[in-house]
Amino acid sequence: MGGPSRRVFLAGDSSVTGRQRSFAPMAGWGQTLPLFIRGAEVINCARAGASSRSFVERGRLAWILREARPGDLVLFSFGLIDMKPGQGRYTEPFKEYQGYLRNCVDGVRDRGAHPILVTSHERRVFDAQGNLRRLLGVYPLAMKEIAAEKSVPLIDLNEWSVRWWRRAGSQGTHEIFLYLAAGEHPNYPDGVADNTHLKVAGAIECARFIASEMRARSMLEPGCFDRLERARFPEDAVEWPTDHVFDELTRTRTLEVVK
């Protein structure tokens, strides 16, 4: 017998992408989503440094559209890179950003597949009084407008993450984000203080929320979900590809776009 007939494609930036073993314990939520979705194949096409613009213009959306079959799901999560100035990536929230999201939604629907929009989780930045700053600004709102305009299901990871980051506070979020002391992990011998990327434990909880929303809203059959109530997972439960495998997946999941 073949593998799962239902497939879940992931399109997004470094908050979603799978990380190679040399980056552990940094992880995107797309890397941990297979812990909770067992009856469908998760195909993670997200890439670090991708905005909605670059994902489309560099042929990554084109690969998904070539591969997608009727009934497949395609989750889109952009914003963390769209807000950064820089040629080829930056988009205005209510202009190009919404335009690229429309292209994504329309392209997926043209192939009989189902788009789902996921707002990006918030960065970890607190002011001197301990208040969380919402640096993503209006990008989540711009995505919500497209969801309403196009009648696309939306999973509001941004709002959920804000509540979690606030409860954890400035110190507690060190356990969620990639904060490591010098010598704590061989991949980061000098230590690291990263306010954007998650440790694997944080990525697991984001994936749990997304999978729970998908189950609650019947985006996949109930039997496709598993272990949503499991509190902890061993370190080897998450797959960490080698650099070679990661580079090969990046190369092959891109199509040349005719401009």
Image (cartoon, grey):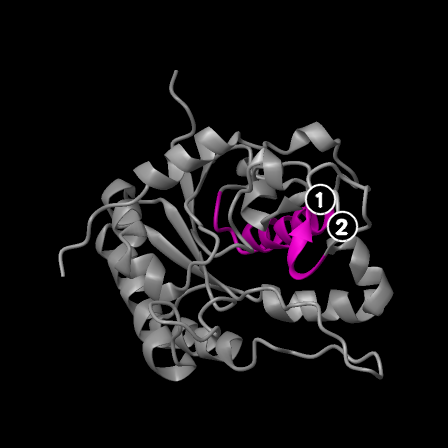
132 is higher (above) or lower (below) than 228: below
Q: Which class describes the residues within 10 Å of circle 2: few (<14), some (14-19), or many (20+)?
A: some
| Residues packed near mark 1 inside 10 Å, few (<14), some (14 to 19) or many (20 plus) | some
Majority secondary structure in the magenta region:
helix
Q: Amino acid at mark 2?
A: Gly
Query: What kind of element bears circle 2?
Result: loop
Q: Secondary structure at mark 1?
A: loop
What mark, if any, has residue 224 been given in the picture? Answer: none
* 25 sits left or right of 37 in the view: right
Query: What is the quadrant of the C terminus in the image?
Result: bottom left
The number of numbered discs placed on residues in the rendered structure image is 2
Q: Nearer the viewer, residue 8 or 27?
A: 27
Residue farthest along the top direction in this orientation: 1
The stretch drawn in magenta includes residue 209: yes
Q: Residue at x 53, y 31 (%)?
A: 241
Q: Residue 223: say if magenta.
A: no
Up-down relation of residue 213 to residue 141 (above or below): above
The residue under label 1 is 188
Residue span colored magenta: 193-220
Tell me the tag on residue 191: 2
Question: What's under tag 1, amino acid-wise?
Answer: Tyr
Q: Position of residue 117 (x, y in %)?
A: 45, 63
Q: Quadrant of residue 126?
A: bottom right
Q: Position of residue 43 (x, y in %)?
A: 43, 39
